[in-house]
Amino acid sequence: MSTHAPEIEKVVIDGPAGAIEAMVERPSGARSDIVAVCCHPHPLFGGTMQNKVVHTLARACQDQRVTTLRFNFRGVGASAGVHDDGAGESDDAAAVADWAREATGAARLWSLGFSFGGFVAYRLATLRSAAALVTVAPPVQRFDFTKLPVPGCPWYVAQGDRDDLVNHESVLAWTRTLRPPPEVRILAGAEHFFHGRLTELRSLLGAWLAARAVE
């Protein structure tokens, strides 16, 4: 893991519902070929780009020298618009991804998200042909993932078995039906927000992303 803090730039991106508040984080020696977009949990339950799990997703990418963008969905923080139950937020993520690719010149997109953000990241991966997808605690009980196309890129699912908001058995049942299937990691004893387990989560994601970085 990198111990150096990334260079941070606060930006405003023109999105489909107006301004999107975002943060670009460039690690030391940043690669030019990959950029990562990280999506936060549910806005109506306090989710923002400052969420600790989303920060962990970003740092796992930065450990691989990949520049990241975290952003606030519509209606959150300084982002314009109102909550749209995942549809508009997916459009926001696509706008951020397009901006990120143009700003960095990166040809490859990594799409990552936590909880509600996992649903958005999943949609983004198919909307913009991501090179890698990470969904942490994907909310399979709230959103019907089965109606969406299955991403063709390498895909990692991390889920705690003590999660009181997302049932790990439901996640396992869903992922077993998919072709191609994602790589699934169940963290024993971990709850929804991975309290006390974020360093472990970052390490697991880092190992998986390291392999994606050389593909």
Image (spheres, grey):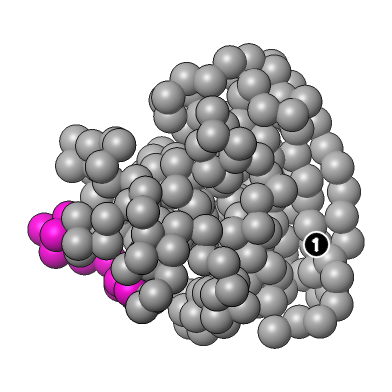
Quadrant of the image for the N terminus?
Answer: bottom right
Q: Residue at x 75, y 39 (%)?
A: 22
Where 78 sits versus 140, above or below? above
User: Which residue has dot 1 on it?
Assistant: 26
Residue 115 locus on image (x, y percent): 44, 48
The reply to whether residue 169 is visible in this rendering is: yes
Where 78 sits versus 204, above or below? above
Q: Residue at x 47, y 20 (%)?
A: 84
Where 132 sits versus 4, above or below? above
What are the residue bounds of the magenta stretch?
A: 173-186
Hey, what amino acid is under mark 1? Arg
Q: Which of 200 and 207 is in front in this view?
A: 200
Q: In this image, 210 relative to 101: left or right? A: left
Residue 181: say if magenta. Answer: yes
Residue 166 locus on image (x, y percent): 33, 52
For residue 45, what is the image quadrant? top right
Q: What element carries label 1?
A: strand
Q: Which of 168 and 84 is in front in this view?
A: 168
Residue 110: say if magenta. Answer: no
Residue 21 locus on image (x, y percent): 75, 32
Number of numbered callouts drawn: 1
The residue lying furthest to the left in this view is 177
Q: Which residue is drawn at 43% across and 70% down?
A: 190
Q: Which of 103 and 191 is in front in this view?
A: 191
Residue 18 locus on image (x, y percent): 69, 16
For residue 57, what is the image quadrant? bottom right
Q: How crowded is mark 1: few (under 14 residues within 10 Å), some or many (20 or more)?
A: many
The reply to whether residue 178 is visible in this rendering is: no
Q: In this image, 153 relative to 97: left or right? A: left
Q: Which residue is drawn at 29% across and 36% down?
A: 143
